[in-house]
Image (spheres, helix red, strand yellow):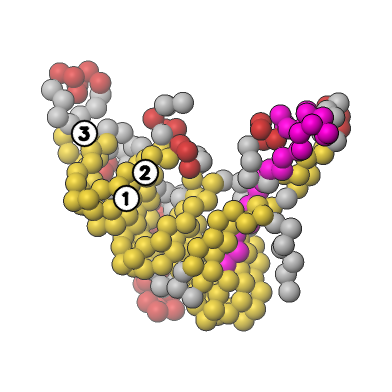
Amino acid sequence: MINYHHWKLLQEATGQGTQWQIMGYPRFVDMQPTGFDASRILASGQPLRDAMIHAVTPMGVTPIHPIYPRKHVRVALNNASVLLEPGALHFSKGHIDMKIDGVQDAGVGGFLKKAASGLASGESMVKPRYTGTGEIFLEPRTDFLYFVELNNERLVCDRGLFVACDGTLTVDGQVNRSAIRSGEGMVQPRVQGSGVVMLSSPVPQEKIMVVEMNNETLKVDGAFVMAYWGDLAFSVEKSSRGMFSAAASGEGFVNVYKGTGTVWMNLEEANCF
């Protein structure tokens, strides 16, 4: 038995024979040297600034609000499998086996193909697969984590955002030859099928603009899109700006997304705040 009941449940999702949980990992921050009325605060998902405001308030007036800056990810497997980013595993418990996805099935050629895709994208396309019944815990982390549930869909995300997914999904790289001019990069991680995907984010949810598309076209001037999924096609087109304005700005192309699905845009990258 693993005792993690003192952790705070932040998010959860049910996948294909899997149960995913993101939990806040508590730690203590010593406030005594600062002379605050509160000697300690329990660290957990609340912004540190807000917690410090509570900490300087007398205990009898306002209670200290806990925060959780570190997170643990728990995945319960019931005769199922998951794919992880290399190095993401912290520990596992139960009857769980590991193999490098694609090597045993496709041999050395499959491994080299995935390795070549990784070199082109700057991200490993060789994912360890954990199969069986038991529990898997990922390394503690401080970034923002989100679940995306795919239903026979395709998800493409920025390099470095993929963390893990259900073993029912396939993970490879999408080659965007036309994206060289747009700054999006030639190869991006692509996840296809049905199941749960866990993504990392450099910004919190309130700084992500969610765009829902229904057989529409979205044109983005800049590399602000973090991820998109559904039935969406990506391309790069010349900007509708005049030739003079495009030349003066150094820009002349936009990223175009067509179809039905969801697009996440990072507002922080747009210097909106």
Residue 138 horizontal/vertical position (percent): 60, 61
Residue found 32% across the figure and 44% down from its top:
211
Picture layout, residue 251 above or below residue 45: above
Say if residue 235 shows up in the picture.
no
Say if residue 5 shows up in the picture.
yes
Near-viewer residue (245 or 262): 262
Residue found 40% across the figure and 79% down from its top:
105
Q: Which residues are magenta?
A: 52-75
In the image, what residue type sits under mark 3? Phe
Q: Earlier in the sequence, mark 3 or mark 2?
A: 2
Instruction: Answer left or right for 91 relative to 154.
Output: right
Picture layout, residue 113 above or below residue 161: below
Q: Earlier in the sequence, mark 2 or mark 1?
A: 2
Instruction: Check the image and name the residue furthest to the front.
Output: 61
Kind of element beneath mark 1: strand
- Disc number at residue 253? 3
